[in-house]
Image (spheres, rainbow, N blue to C red):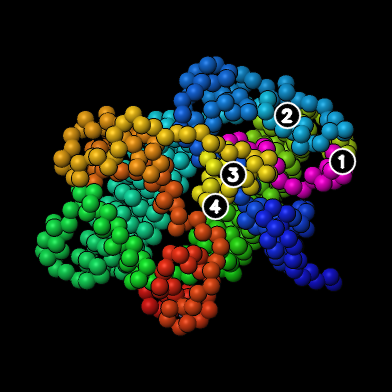
Amino acid sequence: MNTKSQLNKNCIDCKNEFTIDSGDLLLYEKIGLKIPEKCFECRTKQYFIFSIFGKFRKGVSDLSGESLITVFPNNPRYPIYKSHEWWSDDWDPLVFGQDYDSSKSFFTQLKELQEKIPRPHQIGQNNTNCDWSDDVWDSKNCYLTRSVSKCDNLSYCYRILDSKDSFDLVYSFNLENCYDCVGCHNSFNLNFSEKSKDCIDSYFLFDCRNCQNCFMCWNLRNKQFCIKNKQYTREKYLEELKKIKLDSYKNIENLKIEFENILKNEAVHRENFNIKTTNSTGNYLTNCDKCVNTFAWENSQNCRNSLRGLNTKDCIDQGFSWNLELSGNNGIVDGGYQIKHSACSVGRYSEYLDLCKEVEYCFGCVGLRNKKYCILNKQYDKEKYEKLKEKIIADMENREEYGKFFPYSFGTGSYNLTNGIIYFPSTTKEEVLKNGGYWSDEDLSQTNGISSLELPDSILDTEPEISKQALICPETKYRFNISQAEYEFHKRKNFVLPRLHFDLRIMRKMKTMSVIKTYPYKCFYCEKDIEAYYPPEWNYQKIACEECYKQNIA
Ligand SMILES: [Zn+2]
Ligand SMILES: [Zn+2]
């Protein structure tokens, strides 16, 4: 029996050494993938070339001229149709079918095809009044919001499930009437909080569970009326809370600094945030078994080297992917079996798909729906398909193309406006251009408006008309407005109005959820060596191994 050990290689992108372990090798073989030439980070980075965070802009459909709102760039390389038009029978992707030309690189031919095929202006379906949103599913009244499902009345949110009546949430599930939370679950009227669960009517909580009426607390369980982890009586708590001015910008800024210092010096941080997960490594895993080096992933078994997804089995090397089995080397694939080197598609037994839905046995196709045996959007019969596919793979092998993910030049927007930049913020323009990708140098800064820093310190000194005032973010210099709904929400909660542009607010909050690299620490309690997902510059003083965290906190 041939027992496979690990392989050490040098990444062709970043030149760093990386390891492919025996578990990786087994899965590559089982799925039928080549051993990658890029390290985990460089591979994952590339899966995001199709995943646009973007800037919301108005445009028109290239089919009907109907107006639309999209995060896709101005002057894209491809036509844009309104989603309902894209999903209709008003156009036929087979019309763009190409014969394969053996004398030319397959990627070159596939890219020519890609540029003729329209893309739907927005990802998601079954929404009401969610025009100014993207990647939104089964939701109502969402505004300047991305990546949400089953939500109602959200603004400026990112990656949210089953939540409503909230503003400025990131990576949270099941929240209601909440503001400025990241990594929180099952809570009502929770505000300015991080990684807390089952909490009600509270502010500035970190890693609290089942707390009610608490302010500026950390690692608490089942408490009421606490301030800075100190127990108060109900009367005293309410009296103290009245003295805290959440309506004032100066005051909120000081409270945020205080909270930040608590995270550094007082709070105990878990080695990882994996829940109901066994035999796995990575972070933010829920209900996973045998998932290795996998992040922000749920309900999956035997998956590796993947970032942000759910419901997968026996998969490797994927970004933003779900409902998949025996698949790998994919970015944003939303379902299938034996899908390889593909993006934005659902299908089975197929490779090099872009934007295909419910296809089987297709190779190198773009924008197809319910098709079988197609290559470069041309229909073949089974025999001809198999033969041509074999020929193309042989040619691709000769050109060293086969097995690689789509090159950066297939990206649907500038890399600095993709979701990739959230997870890989140090990505440089040089690196992306060198790989044939795109980078936006467009200066979106504006001057016709007042600096948001000129707003009155307290929301109490503002009127609803403020939502008509164009504001300039002091950091990005982007122009933004306080929406009417936002003003009402803040007024009702008596919270300060935001000073930063909404996209920057999302980016900042994602910082703690986007680390996919461990750093060596010693457990604060037992001094055991541990690997934790906290960059040293965050200066967290108390990081605990799983056992000590459970003994002392949970
Ligand atoms: Zn690399
Ligand atoms: Zn320990």
Q: Looking at the figure, which quarter contains the C terminus? A: bottom left
User: Looking at the image, is mark 1 or mark 2 earlier in the sequence?
Assistant: 2
User: Label 4 neighbourhood size at 10 Å, few (<14), some (14-19), many (20+)?
Assistant: few
Residue 3, given in percent of the width and then of the height, sits at: 80, 71
Residue 98 shown left or right of residue 273 in the figure: right
Cα separation between marks 1 and 4: 36 Å
Q: Amino acid at mark 4?
A: Ser
Residue sitting nearer the eye, 231 or 428: 428
What is the C-alpha distance between the residues marked 2 and 4? 31 Å
Q: Report the amino acid beneath label 1.
A: Asp
Quadrant of the rendered image containing residue 279: bottom right
> Is 336 on the left-hand or right-hand side of 553?
right
Name which residue lies at 64% across and 20% down: 91
For badge 3, the amino acid type reads: Lys
Q: In the rendered image, which residue does mark 3 sit on?
A: 429
Choose mark 2 or mark 4, whichever is in front.
Answer: 4
Q: Of helix, strand and loop, which one carries label 1?
A: helix
Q: What residue sits right under mark 2 in the picture?
A: 112
- Element under label 3? helix
Tell me the tag on residue 395. 1
Residue at the spot 24% in from the left edge and 67% down from the top edge: 228
Asked if labels 4 and 1 touch by Cβ distance under 8 angstroms, the answer is no
Q: Residues within 10 Å of mark 3 (few under 14, many from 20)?
A: some
> Which residue has dot 4 on it?
426
SS for dot 2: helix
Tell me the amino acid under the disc marked 2: Glu
Q: Point out the image quarter for the N terminus.
A: bottom right
Marks 4/3: CA distance? 10 Å
Which region is colored magenta? 392-413
Distance between the Cα atoms at labels 3 and 2?
24 Å
Q: Residue furthest bottom?
A: 526
Identify the residue shown where x is 34% and y is 62%. Answer: 260
